[in-house]
Amino acid sequence: MTVLHLEPLERPARVSAALVFWALLRRDLRVARRELPAVLVRVALQPILFVTVFGALLPRMGFVQRSYGAALLPGILAISLAMSSIQSVALPMVADFGWTREIEDRLLAPVPISLVALEKVLFGVVQGTIAALFVLPIARLIMGPIAGLTIAHAGEVLTVTILGATSFSLLGLLIGTAISPQQIGLMFSVLIAPMIFFGCAYYPWKGLAVAPVLQYAVLVNPLVYVSEGMRGALTPALPHMGLPVVTFALAVICALCWYFGFRAFVRRAMS
Amino acid sequence: MTPVPAIRTIALRKVYPAPKLRRAAYSSAFPMPGGAALTGAMPGAGPNGDIVALEGLDLEIPAGEFFGLLGPNGAGKTTTISILTTRGELTSGQAVVAGADVVRESAAVRQRIGVVPQRPNPDRSLTARENLIFHAAYFGIPHAAAASRADSLLAAFGLADRGGAKVGELSGGQQQRLMIARALMHDPEVLFLDEPTVGLDPQTRLALWDVLRDLHARGHTIVLTTHYMEEADRLCERIAILDRGRLLALDTPAGLKARAPGGTLVEITLDADASAVTTAAAALPGVLKAEAQRALLRAYAERPGEVLAGLVRECERAGRAVLNIHLAPPSLETLFISLTGRSLD
């Protein structure tokens, strides 16, 4: 080490929160870009395997009707979006609060701490949206022509995608602040797996009429609304919940996760 | 020169609540007036089994001072730093850093301080240089200024050829240096270092001391926590000795040393409880003071050579075997031991 030769720095008198927010987002984008292939594999591999078996192979074998693809595709998009949003927020946060404390440099930024959480959520929304848009054409390619699939309601698709990604990013914030690194495995088996299987991703909600108790129990599951919303936007011929219902339910979920998630984040961030 | 102190704390108090299960056993549903006075009687543990980490800390550190917080683990050093750097909540009291209140104006405080953590926590997804540049961006510093400053700091800390390396490829000492470089990126008025030289090799430690002296000479206020006596003695203008959340002494190193109990400390380790020997030891001619802590006998004497034989004889007479003898001339260490009854490590 040599003696320091530092020029005095022209520091801004007051730091603009928007500028700091942009810097935080740039950091996450830089890291994501570097890990892009891994991220895409993580996002796309499971849906690809699923549509290959259930959307392409089983129908050809005759075990599943060809029309099943129309019910499956929107659900697969919903799952990709949900998993991507949750993971991109929750997993780094669990590590950060659990042991690495790498986020400390951002918590020392001269802005309110909640801004750091807000950036994480926004980044989760971006990742979830990209995941959905990435999986859609791949799934369509694997499954072949799907009866009733339309992109006429692109606006609705985008609305459901962004609202869904926001819900799951906020849920990721809540999960990321609530669980310890040792509980990550448990989270997948206890929380994520039931959420996916009872998320109306593989079947329309109306079909659950065969099990009425279950049909109403699953309404606490945010994935239900994203799956149904996607169905309404992409394959409107199939039974689905109306967009107003979907929008309202997701807005309520967002508000709840926002309130508890941000409180939990600030509490975890302070020692 | 400036009348405004860089740091002022008033009756700073921090209590970590007891785990919920234990708390449930005490059902104090209502806050009691005078509860603080009650806990004050029992430092370390409050009612409900809460842990009192800081008990009414009053500090005033003028701008430009090199200030040391000295104490063993659990003394409250890290708690103090975390409150002053806005990263820890305070239970009561007030703290002002660089002219801003740590609770009400925490963002303003963060803009004016630099923090070097106890354990390096670099952003491992970024390179060393990116760590510095993004840190500057979080402080609103334009990219061009940040880039040139990052390069000067990397060079100054012997990391010029490591700028492009992922942080994981840096050695522990290099990571610690990177943390200090990072803390300096936004040119903070006050620099906090929490035990920055733990785990550094002696050569790096000396180099770091030079850097800190240099920063101090440029007018930065520096607050350093350490449990190395020598480090505090060599670097700091004033030292606060903390133990169990309380301020035990606050003075210049020379002033503190002058307050150390007279004479050299003679520590005799016995094979069993030493309290049987204290009365006889204190009565020996030339012994200024004698006390026992479990199997350790501590005696102070102006001329230790003259009392050593007598002390050993008294120990043997009390049926104790002498296992070890250690002499320590008056120093911060002997002061610390006389204040707390404990040694630093």
Image (tube, coloured by chain):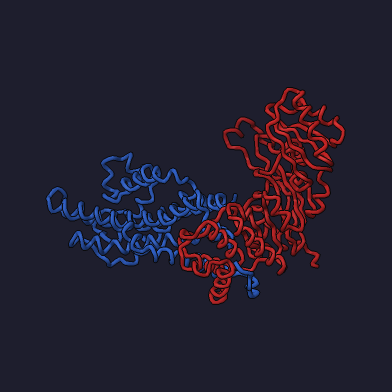
Could you say which quadrant of the image residue A234 lies in? bottom left
Q: Judge whether residue B65 can be spotted in this image.
A: yes
Instruction: Decide: is B55 above or below A7.
Output: above
The quarter of the rendered structure image containing the C terminus of chain B is: top right
Q: Give the colour chain A carries in the figure.
A: blue
Q: Position of residue B71 (x, y in %)?
A: 70, 46
Instruction: Decide: is A195 above or below B165.
Output: above
Residue at image position (27%, 67%) is A152
**What is the tally of numbered marks visible in this picture?**
0
Q: Position of residue B8 (x, y in %)?
A: 75, 56
In this view, the residue in front, A115 or A99, is: A99
In this view, the residue in front, A38 or A4, is: A4
Q: Position of residue B140 (x, y in %)?
A: 57, 70
Residue at image position (63%, 65%) is B111
Q: Which chain is red?
A: B
Could you say which quadrant of the image residue A82 lies in? bottom left
In-image side of A209 versus B287 (left or right) = left
Q: Position of residue B225 (x, y in %)?
A: 67, 53
Residue at the right extreme?
B285
In this view, the residue in front, B210 or A200, is: B210
